[in-house]
Image (spheres, rainbow, N blue to C red):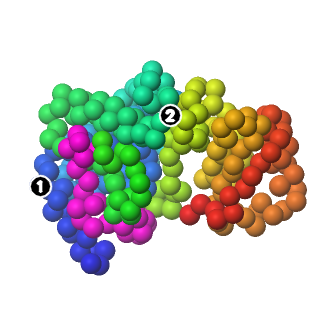
Amino acid sequence: MQLDAKHDNLITILKNYGRVAVAFSGGADSSLLLKCALDTLGTKNVLMLFAHSELLMPVEIEHAVQWPRANGHAHAIEMEMVELEPLTWEEFVCNGENRCYFCKRNMYARFRESMEQRAFTWLIDGTNMDDLKEHRAGLRAIRELGVRMPFVDAGFSKADVRLLSQRAGLATWDRPSSSCLATRIPAGMRITRERLQQAAMLENGMEQFGLVGCRVRLCAGREHEVHVEIRSQDFARLAESGVRMALLGHFRHHGISKVLLFLQGRE
């Protein structure tokens, strides 16, 4: 199916929902979903829900807060910042294989409460067809809570999301995929505030060298070692000896003596 046909299908789906609350993260998927919902249903029929917690990088919070102003809706959108305290959820901080399920379940349950208090009909999420091909524990929570996935219903792939976002003039069209800071901590290694802050600090340092969208993953049982992922297009920059040595200095300054690079790269 061509993208224009998928877009028409998406509009029909959104119209049938009536009043929607959008689970908004600030990334490419939720940004396009929010824009399409606003364009189709109008600002009075759209609620923007954002989960604020220590699992997010400060720049992600800033992107979300600034989205309405950056996209011409400075005073029109109804937005709620839902405060979460994931480090109080034992089933989450113990960091088992179902960590993402418990997190998404708690988050979207709070979203549903906020939505229902304001008489919105459906909670919608930016999951696309490509997401269904991966093992994502959070998808089980989405289905259990009756959250709608209009991109899936309309047949959107990630490439479709990016292309339509570019056409719509959204700055998020080529933004690298993001995930919460807990994903930097390997399964079985307890999630703590200190470890989240360490991962955020190390990634912020890498981004100062232009390596945007990087990932720094901690290693269980080896506190002085990390695994690093960068985008495929950034390998040439990392090959520059001055940049590489400066990065090593950054890691050593923060107590990391061994840095392993994932050669496949992030897309």
> What's under tag 1, amino acid-wise?
Asn
User: Is residue 113 visible to us here?
Assistant: yes
How packed mark 1 is, by other alpha carbons closer than 10 Å (few <14, some 14-19, many 20 or more), is few
Position of residue 171 measured from the top left corner of the image (x, y, whole percent): 48, 57
Task: Say whether residue 182 is left or right of residue 23.
Answer: right
Per the image, the residue denoted by label 2 is 95
> What's under tag 2, amino acid-wise?
Asn
Q: Residue at x 63, y 26 (%)?
A: 194
Say what secondary structure mark 2 lies in: loop
Position of residue 28 measured from the top left corner of the image (x, y, whole percent): 43, 56
Q: Residue at x 34, y 54 (%)?
A: 127
Position of residue 13 measured from the top left corner of the image (x, y, whole percent): 17, 59
Per the image, the residue denoted by label 1 is 16
Say what secondary structure mark 1 lies in: helix
- Could you tell which of marks 2 and 1 lies nearer the N-terminus? 1
Nearer to us: label 2 or label 1: 2
User: Is residue 203 visible to us here?
Assistant: no
Q: Is residue 148 magenta?
A: yes
How packed mark 2 is, by other alpha carbons closer than 10 Å (few <14, some 14-19, many 20 or more), is many
> Are dots 2 and 1 in contact, CB under 8 Å?
no
Magenta residues span 142-169
Task: Say whether residue 172 is left or right of residue 58.
Answer: left
Relative to 27, residue 198 above or below: above
In this rendering, the count of numbered labels is 2
Q: Residue at x 14, y 56 (%)?
A: 15
> Which corner quadrant of the image does residue 68 belong to?
top left
Relative to 105, residue 235 above or below: below
Relative to 15, residue 26 above or below: above
Q: Nearer the viewer, residue 136 or 162?
A: 136
Q: Give residue 44's mark.
A: none
- Residues at marks 2 and 1, CA–CA distance in whole angstroms: 39 Å
Q: On the rendered image, what quadrant is the N terminus found in?
A: bottom left
